Image (cartoon, helix red, strand yellow):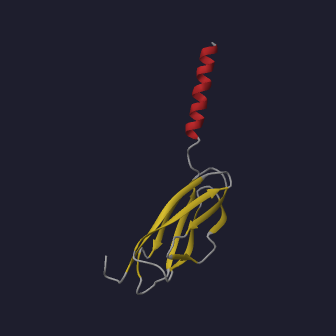
Amino acid sequence: MRKIFALLLILLLCGCIIKGGEHKIKISSEVTPSRVSLAERESLKIEVKVTNIGKQKEKISVEVGGTQGLKISMPKVTTFVLKPDESRIITFPAELTEDALPGDYVIDVKVSTESGDVVEDKAKVRVVEKKGLL
């Protein structure tokens, strides 16, 4: 009987550990426009969509990490509350800096909850010398 109890306890603990890996939030991010030229220096928008897929209200923090050659205008961290099944799109204005060079830029996006859930994503933008060039 003790062996059966010990086995059930081990299985229960393993199930809790495996289930603990599920996220309570879902994110997607993108930069618009996804391609800009150094010649025209368009304004950029980093958009992060956050959805609470958990069963309770969550206090969310969204953080975007700038990269050399790209300046993010707003505070790099935004905090808000989402109810279950609620979504919100947060927009971070950005622009190329004077020292920007052609290439692919990657912006790190990190979303965390007060309860400790953390989800990360990457948004990308291609910078070209002139429009019409790859």
Quadrant into which the C terminus falls:
bottom left
The image quadrant of residue 63 is: bottom right
* Above or below, 23 relative to 98: above
* Above or below, 58 relative to 132: above
In x, y percent, where is residue 104?
Answer: 41, 70
Comparing 93 with 25, the one in front is 93
The residue at the far top in this view is 1
The residue at the far bottom in this view is 40
Comparing 99 with 55, the one in front is 99
Quadrant into which the N terminus falls:
top right
The image quadrant of residue 25 is: bottom right
Comparing 86 with 2, the one in front is 2
Residue at screen point 57% across, 27% down? 11
Residue at screen point 31% across, 80% down? 133
Q: From the viewer's perspective, is 128 left or right of 66?
A: left
In x, y percent, where is residue 65?
Answer: 56, 67
Residue at screen point 59% across, 17% down? 4
In x, y percent, where is residue 26?
Answer: 54, 56
* Above or below, 99 relative to 109: below
Q: Tell me how many marks there are.
A: 0
Q: From the viewer's perspective, is 84 left or right of 124?
A: right
The image quadrant of residue 74 is: bottom right
The residue at the far front in this view is 99
Q: From the viewer's perspective, is 90 left or right of 127?
A: right
